Image: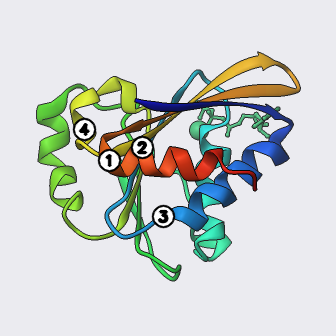
Amino acid sequence: MESLNLHLRGADATRTLGERIAALLSPGDFVGLSGDLGAGKTTLVRSICEALGVPRERIASPTFAIVHPYEGGRLPVWHADLYRLGDEDELFETGFFELRESGGVLLVEWIERIPAAAPEEWLHVELRHVDEESREARIRGHGARGEALVRALRRPA
Ligand SMILES: Nc1ncnc2c1ncn2[C@@H]1O[C@H](COP(=O)(O)OP(=O)(O)OP(=O)(O)O)[C@@H](O)[C@H]1O
Ligand SMILES: [Mg+2]
């Protein structure tokens, strides 16, 4: 499996990573995010969405809706947050699995809660606290597409 660890000093470094990921995304790509409370998941999702051209005022927290669509950007985006979901059956009922075929980009927070939510080919970004001022991103590529994304991120920006 291709993997890459990055040290992110300050929230701007998280945002820069988001911009770099956004520049690589194609229809159907799946990015799963995990990490503790306050690790920077939402910061990363918002920066990906903004870099894809989603108008800033549309970017919300999908906590209640589970899945939230964003239009107006370069690609359609679905932002999901699995934090409050119990299991795969509950996720199935939301229609989530049909979205994987929709040709949009999926950005899924708390992917570790329901690992079966992820497809065979995807990018996993795990954010960890280092200290108050910095985080570590552990990026792993699953399947051919996920591995290609990691290799592209490894190239100097
Ligand atoms: N690389 C970084 N270094 C230092 N602070 C960061 C970094 N990335 C993000 N932050 C800051 O960490 C705080 C929490 O970020 P954010 O809300 O994105 O986390 P989260 O993972 O979504 O949290 P939650 O699980 O509570 O929703 C914010 O103040 C953000 O600016
Ligand atoms: Mg959050």
Q: Are dots 1 and 2 in contact, CB under 8 Å?
A: yes
Q: CA distance from mark 1 to mark 3?
A: 14 Å
Give me the residue at 44% from left, 51% from top. Answer: 148
Circle 3 residues within 10 Å: few <14, some 14–19, many ≥20: some
What secondary structure is marked by label 3? loop
Circle 2 residues within 10 Å: few <14, some 14–19, many ≥20: many
Q: Read off the residue under disc 3.
A: 25
Circle 4 residues within 10 Å: few <14, some 14–19, many ≥20: some
What secondary structure is marked by label 4? helix
What secondary structure is marked by label 1? helix
Q: Read off the residue under disc 1.
A: 144
Q: Position of residue 61 (x, y in %)?
A: 53, 51
Q: CA distance from mark 4 to mark 1?
A: 18 Å
What secondary structure is marked by label 2? helix
Q: Position of residue 88 (x, y in %)?
A: 16, 31
Check the image and report above or below for 36 versus 120: above
